[in-house]
Amino acid sequence: VPEGDMYIGIVARDFNYNQRVAAHSRFIQKSGMALVNSYDLYFAWGDRCEEALRPNAELSHLVTGINGWDQVIVTPTGQSPPDLTCDLQALGDAYGKNYERAKLGIRLFGKEVEDTFRNMNLDDTYTLCFWGVSQVIDLLGWKMKLGMQVSMATFFEESPLHVAMYEIERSDDISEERHLESRKKYYLDFMFWSNAVCCPALPSRYIFCDAPKAVTNDSSEPISPPPAILLPESATLHGGGRRGVSPTSSNGSNNSGQNSARSSSLLALWSQRLRWIPQSACSLPSTHHRKNGRA
């Protein structure tokens, strides 16, 4: 159960920090922040160039507190949680307490959600919904919507977006406000990228595996972690501008016939691209992360 402060949002974990912040990036940042001023945001450019090589350098962040969720449903133990493929905004309290920002208002919603997470337990089921950022980011088109459309490839040319939820341990040093990796405990970390970017370094940084059958087949069988897999030499970028193996490509067969009955389900479509990433590939020590991720 979390004991520190919880945050959700974007963390640039694979970004190339060996560069100064560009002037056009600062302009876009000011424009974007003005459109999401209803959130209590923490923004940081992250340490750059020589400072980025320090063992505990800060990454770039755009995150908000736990009341940044747009909807939270708390289903009591013994009761079935809602089906994720249905319209969650039309459920009422049929599956437990249902807090919606649009209905409660920012202030009351924030109070209820903070109370919920302060009293979080391991018995109830928590359904968390987040869509507010869609007003400024088009993930499928890989564009920012800031009155005009701006390609995100301009800023994330070779790196994905990490949408994460993490906990920051409370420090006795009240002057320390940075979101350092050494202070974090990650609960969720989803990588998003588009065909507009090639992300050539990802195969050398992560091990991408097919999801366990218990996930793709909706089986009740227990899920066990996959065995350790060594990256083939051909999957590592060796320079020369060559594009690496696409991390979304599958080494296994495409069970399209098996999933055809569920083709209308968004989750079923996602499961065809789902990849299981071992903890050893994600939770790298800070020094190793800086050494291998910033060159």
Image (cartoon, rainbow, N blue to C red):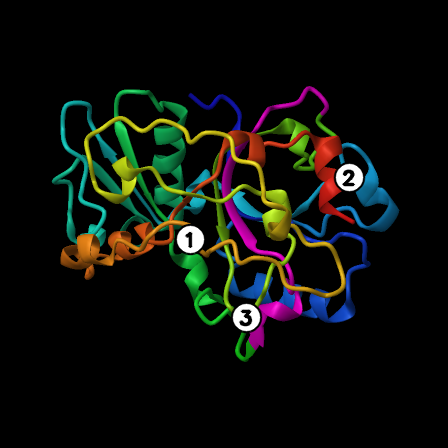
Marker disc for residue 291: 2
Residue under the point 54% across and 70% down: 196
Task: Identify the amino acid type marked 3.
Answer: Ala
Q: Earlier in the sequence, mark 3 or mark 1?
A: 3
Tell whether position 39 is magenta.
no
Residue carrying label 3: 196
Tell me the residue at 84%/50% (across/down): 49
What range is drawn magenta here?
150-173
Q: In the picture, residue 179 is in which quadrant? A: top right
Q: What residue did someone put label 1 on?
A: 250
**151 part of magenta stretch:** yes
Residue at 20 percent across and 60 percent down: it is 263
User: In the rendered image, which quarter is residue 168 located in?
Assistant: top right
Q: Secondary structure at mark 2?
A: helix
Asked if residue 7 can be seen in this view, the reply is no
Q: Is residue 73 found left or right of 150 in the rendered image?
A: left
Task: Name the spot of residue 244 as percent of width and height, x first.
Answer: 61, 58
Horizontal side, residue 115 vs residue 36: left or right: left
Q: Furthest residue to the right?
A: 50
Residue 64, position as x, y percentages in the image = 52, 45
Q: CA distance from mark 1 to mark 2?
A: 29 Å
User: Which amino acid, mark 2?
Assistant: Lys
